[in-house]
């Protein structure tokens, strides 16, 4: 009896190691926890079996699923207070195209302007979009061709690779309305 | 004696579970796969602890049972702590993997090594 279940656990482990998608591996991990909690019961440890069934088979896979949906999100803070990042507008199209290339989900937050370094250090924010206040016409624009009344700044932390990819995308097909600004992260003091 | 052979086979299978967790840890391409293999190793070690004190015909350590016929409750008390701490370590590791993904843009070990250098 116990040997049958232990062999079954080994089969499930092999399925986990050789499974293609991560989500399938997580579901198989839940199955693995359930069978092992049955094994604990057969070893006359019903308290351990209950704890494993609650924590190992339910809560831990839940945490896995939350984390793998969380890490796909690319969080952008909208500081412009106009319609630049609305659905269908130019900035939204640019960011949505970039996120589709990088296999990310675009999340746009509307927040009141605060201190930017504070935002980067405290939250999981990847990019801040702001109105370019010191635009006079001859700044370090990515491409300065057509004059328009407003320019926008994309602010990100320079150590992030996703931000580097965004910079490269903007350099490949230049657009007239946006430029890149890097913000150094503060040393963490918490 | 067939019972001792079966006992040895059980211990062998549990050691195989622990070792397959280590093998998965060594061959994992993804950070999340590595964390899953840590969980597998932890469960295997719990099974090893529980199988050490178990003998056939014994009863769970609940009070009306006479002391001679119950399994030793000490490893069970140790092992419950292991389960809870394992859940905490898993969530901490997943949080760090989210941070790594937002910093480097990938969760693949080889690409991470390339981008680090």
Image: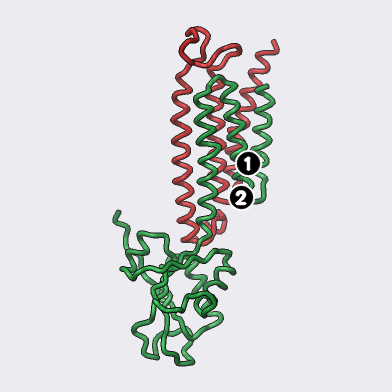
Q: How many marks?
A: 2
Q: Which chain is green?
A: A
Badges 2 and 1, same chain? yes
Give x and y (percent) for residue B99. 45, 56
Please rate how many residues cluster around mark 1, counting C-alpha atoms within 10 Å: few if below 14, some from 14 to 19, many from 20.
Answer: many
Kindly indicate which chain is depicted in red in the rendered structure.
B
Q: Position of residue B87 (x, y in %)?
A: 47, 39
Q: Which residue is mark 2?
A: A22
Mark earlier in primary sequence (2, 1): 2
Residue B31 placement (x, y as % from top left): 54, 50
The circle on residue A79 is none
- Answer with the quarter of the image where residue A4 lies: top right
In the rendered structure, the residue with mark 1 lies on which chain? A
> Which x, y percent locates residue A135?
37, 86
Query: Circle 1 sits on which residue?
Result: A28
User: Which of the two residues, A62 or A179, is positioned nearer the viewer here?
Assistant: A62
In this picture the colour scheme is by chain
Q: Quadrant of residue B21?
A: top right
Question: Residue at (57%, 55%) from the top-left corner?
Answer: B108
Q: Residue furthest left?
A: A189
């Amino acid at each position: 009896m116990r040997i049958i279940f232990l062999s079954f656990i080994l089969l499930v482990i092999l399925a986990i190691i050789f499974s293609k998608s991560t989500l399938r591996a997580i579901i198989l991990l839940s199955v693995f926890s359930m069978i092992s909690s049955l094994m604990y019961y057969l070893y006359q440890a019903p308290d351990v079996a209950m704890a494993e069934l609650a924590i190992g088979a339910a809560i831990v896979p839940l945490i896995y699923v939350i984390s793998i949906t969380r890490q796909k999100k690319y969080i952008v803070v909208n500081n412009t207070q106009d319609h630049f990042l609305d659905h269908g507008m130019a900035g939204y199209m640019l960011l949505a195209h970039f996120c589709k290339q990088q296999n990310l989900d675009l999340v746009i937050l509307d927040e009141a302007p605060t201190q930017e370094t504070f935002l980067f250090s405290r939250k999981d924010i990847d990019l801040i979009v702001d109105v370019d206040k010191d635009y006079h016409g001859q700044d370090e624009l990515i491409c300065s061709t057509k004059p328009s009344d407003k320019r926008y700044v994309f602010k990100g932390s320079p150590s992030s690779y996703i931000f580097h990819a965004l910079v490269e995308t903007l350099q490949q097909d230049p657009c007239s309305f946006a430029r890149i600004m890097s913000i150094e992260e503060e040393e963490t003091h918490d | 004696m067939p019972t001792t052979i079966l006992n040895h086979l059980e211990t062998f299978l549990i050691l195989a579970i622990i070792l397959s967790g280590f093998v998965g840890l060594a061959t994992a391409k993804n950070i999340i796969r590595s964390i899953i293999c840590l969980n597998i190793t932890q469960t295997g070690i719990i099974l090893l602890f529980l199988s050490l004190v178990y003998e056939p015909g014994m009863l769970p350590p609940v009070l009306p049972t006479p002391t001679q016929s119950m399994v030793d409750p000490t490893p069970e008390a140790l092992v419950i702590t292991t389960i809870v701490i394992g859940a905490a370590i898993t969530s901490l590791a997943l949080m760090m993997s989210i941070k790594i993904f937002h910093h480097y843009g990938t969760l693949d070990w080889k690409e991470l090594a390339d981008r680090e250098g």
